[in-house]
Amino acid sequence: PAQRKLLGQIDLCHAAAPQAALKLNLSSSALGLVGAGVPAGYAAGCFLCGRLLSGVSGKRVLIAGAFCGGLSLLMMAAARESPALVIAQILFGLASGAVWPFC
């Protein structure tokens, strides 16, 4: 299930890539960084939320992950340049790692 969720997110990013590149005037390298943000954040999130936060209540980690996921979606919607979009994508990946910590 976690792999399907991640693949779904990557597919959505690829589906919106042409529109995002046109609207934000992204270069191909910036677009690549945006696309790599979620998998990189997810890998870090799985490690951080799965191993380092094992002593913290799962409910708290899940709530924090959902909050960070929502915050990152707002950041993506407000992004006007590629660095902000990459940071939002990484944050979304970290939040996804909190929701699916043991992959």
Image (cartoon, rainbow, N blue to C red):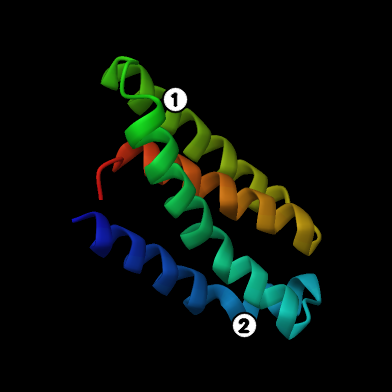
Q: Which residue is farthest front?
A: 51
Helix, strand or loop under label 2: helix
Q: Quadrant of residue 53?
A: top left
The amino acid marked with disc number 2 is Pro
Q: Is residue 59 left or right of residue 16?
A: left
Question: Quadrant where the N terminus lies?
Answer: bottom left
Q: Is residue 73 visible?
A: no
Q: Is residue 27 above or below residue 13?
A: below
Helix, strand or loop under label 1: helix
User: Residue drawn 34% across and 27% down?
Assistant: 62
Sequence-first disc among 1 and 2: 2
Label 1 or label 2, whichever lies nearer to me, is 1
Q: Quadrant of residue 3?
A: bottom left
Name the one closer to the observer, 21 or 27.
27
Label 1–label 2 contact, CB within 8 A:
no
Name the one closer to the observer, 84 or 55.
55
The amino acid marked with disc number 1 is Ala
Q: Is residue 89 above or below residue 52?
A: below
Q: Is residue 2 left or right of residue 9?
A: left
Residue 11: x %, y % from top left: 40, 74
Graded by Cα atoms within 10 Å as few (under 14), some (14 to 19) or many (20 or more), the crowding at tag 1 reads some
Q: Is residue 34 above or below residue 46?
A: below
Badge 1 is on which residue? 64
Residue 72: x %, y % from top left: 58, 43
Q: Is residue 43 visible?
A: yes
Badge 2 is on which residue? 18
